[in-house]
């Protein structure tokens, strides 16, 4: 029989076993447990049909319709699981290598994790089928709905944040990486949001996740860390592209200590020229056009003309002057006592990371 476990156990076992999410593709795309595989019992349309019958006629007619839709798919579902298992080499290697620790688990039996929306009929029925086939299945109590409660509670939890501040082009992402290499706890919000936080932030990035998925990934990242130790975050506005930093976390970020790295303007302009030189004129021009009103008509025109003339350094300097004013305004909204400034003559991420750790 499938074993129902709570969210903490479920996530611990996910380090070894693959997660199968049997909700519809639409439900999965809106948000899912990071690393999960979608194994939909129903298509989006079939789910709507069964739901309508449930509301209008009751549980039993809906169940019969569900069985009618699922019956022909049973073999296909098992074959899909086999494909997922064979592709998920890390999980399978672990599940076959480690001695089973869950009560009632059989040695040598491949294990999988499974959930639906509420931990009800969809996951139970697929779990029954896969147990019959020979897998050991663990289902999530309360399903994805309980996982979302877990996510929101995690994001609201009190933590010891430290903010890495600095004007645009200071190499903050590089410094965060070095802090992580030096055994500091680091969350890269821009990496999770697939956006670097400015009008240019989407260039070279994957499509942004949904807000729900951004929160899911962020919560899982936070859960990796010791809550009694400091966690480093880059100084961000509330919006990273179109993703919103959750309210409880944002309030803590605004009240946290800031390690502000001050890098000369010309060094930052050179850094940005190199960073954005790999992208097309079209991409850069579109980003400049998006901030024309804030940049000013004349400044935007000059930036675009410099770009067209292959003078990317001048383009970067014009845009950087605007972003410096914007960042300084945000910094002024913080309590002065929370900001510790560190002055550096160049971007040496390893050295900067070593120096700023004393802000704790």
Image (tube, rainbow, N blue to C red):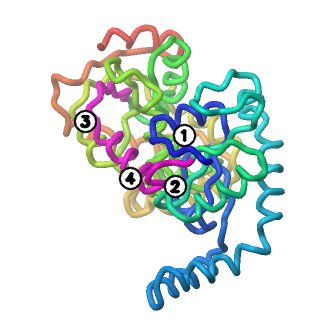
Residue behind mark 2: 302
Real-space Cα distance between discs 1 and 3?
20 Å
Q: Which residues are magenta?
A: 139-165
Real-space Cα distance between discs 1 and 2?
31 Å
Image check: 168 left or right of 77?
Answer: left
Q: Nearer the viewer, mark 2 or mark 3?
A: 3
Q: Is 166 placed above or below 131 here? A: above
Residue behind mark 1: 191
Badge 2 crowding class, 10 Å Cα cut-off, few under 14, some 14 to 19, many 20 or more, is some
Residue behind mark 3: 252
- The answer to which of marks 4 and 2 sits earlier in the sequence is 4
- Snapshot quadrant of residue 104: top right
Q: Is 218 placed above or below 359 here? A: below
Figure quadrant of the C terminus: top left
**Observer able to see residue 288:** no
Residue behind mark 4: 244
Image check: 104 left or right of 132?
Answer: left
Q: Residue at x 57, y 57 (%)?
A: 304
Secondary structure beneath disc 1?
helix
- The answer to which of marks 4 and 3 sits earlier in the sequence is 4
Image check: 138 left or right of 230?
Answer: right
- The answer to which of marks 2 and 3 sits earlier in the sequence is 3
- The answer to which of marks 1 and 4 sits earlier in the sequence is 1
- The answer to which of marks 1 and 3 sits earlier in the sequence is 1
Secondary structure beneath disc 3?
helix
Q: Is 342 placed above or below 238 here? A: above
* Label 4 with label 2: CB-CB less than 8 Å: no
């Amino acid at each position: 029989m499938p074993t129902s476990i709570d969210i903490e156990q479920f996530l611990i076992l996910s380090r070894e076993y693959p997660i199968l999410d049997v909700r519809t593709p639409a439900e999965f795309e809106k948000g899912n447990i990071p690393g999960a595989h979608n194994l939909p019992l129903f298509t989006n349309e079939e789910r709507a049909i069964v739901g309508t019958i449930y509301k209008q006629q009751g549980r039993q007619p809906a169940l019969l319709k569900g069985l009618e839709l699922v019956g022909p798919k049973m073999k296909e579902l098992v074959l899909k699981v086999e494909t997922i298992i064979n592709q998920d080499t890390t999980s399978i290697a672990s599940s076959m290598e480690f001695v089973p620790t869950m009560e009632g688990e059989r040695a040598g039996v491949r294990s999988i994790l499974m959930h639906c929306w509420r931990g009800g009929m969809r996951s139970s029925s697929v779990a029954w089928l896969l147990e019959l086939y020979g897998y050991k299945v663990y289902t999530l109590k309360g399903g994805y709905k309980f996982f979302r409660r877990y996510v929101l509670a995690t994001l609201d939890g009190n933590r010891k944040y430290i903010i890495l501040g600095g004007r645009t082009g200071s190499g903050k992402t590089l410094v965060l990486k070095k802090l992580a290499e030096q055994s500091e706890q680091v969350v890269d919000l821009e990496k999770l949001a697939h956006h670097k936080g400015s009008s240019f932030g989407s260039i070279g990035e994957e499509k942004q996740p949904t807000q729900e998925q951004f929160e899911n990934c962020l919560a899982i990242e936070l859960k990796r860390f010791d809550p009694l130790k400091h966690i480093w975050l880059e100084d961000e506005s509330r919006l990273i592209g179109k993703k919103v930093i959750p309210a409880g976390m944002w309030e803590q970020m605004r009240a946290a200590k800031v390690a502000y790295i001050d890098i000369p303007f010309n060094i930052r302009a050179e850094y940005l020229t190199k960073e954005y030189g790999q992208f097309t004129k079209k991409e850069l021009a579109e980003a400049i056009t998006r901030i024309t009103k804030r940049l000013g008509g004349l400044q935007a025109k000059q930036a675009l003309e410099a770009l067209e003339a292959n003078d990317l350094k001048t383009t970067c300097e014009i845009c950087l002057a605007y972003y410096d004013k914007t960042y300084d305004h945000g910094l002024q909204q913080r309590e002065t006592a929370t900001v510790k400034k560190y002055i550096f003559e160049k971007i040496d991420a390893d050295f900067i990371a070593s120096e700023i750790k004393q802000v704790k």
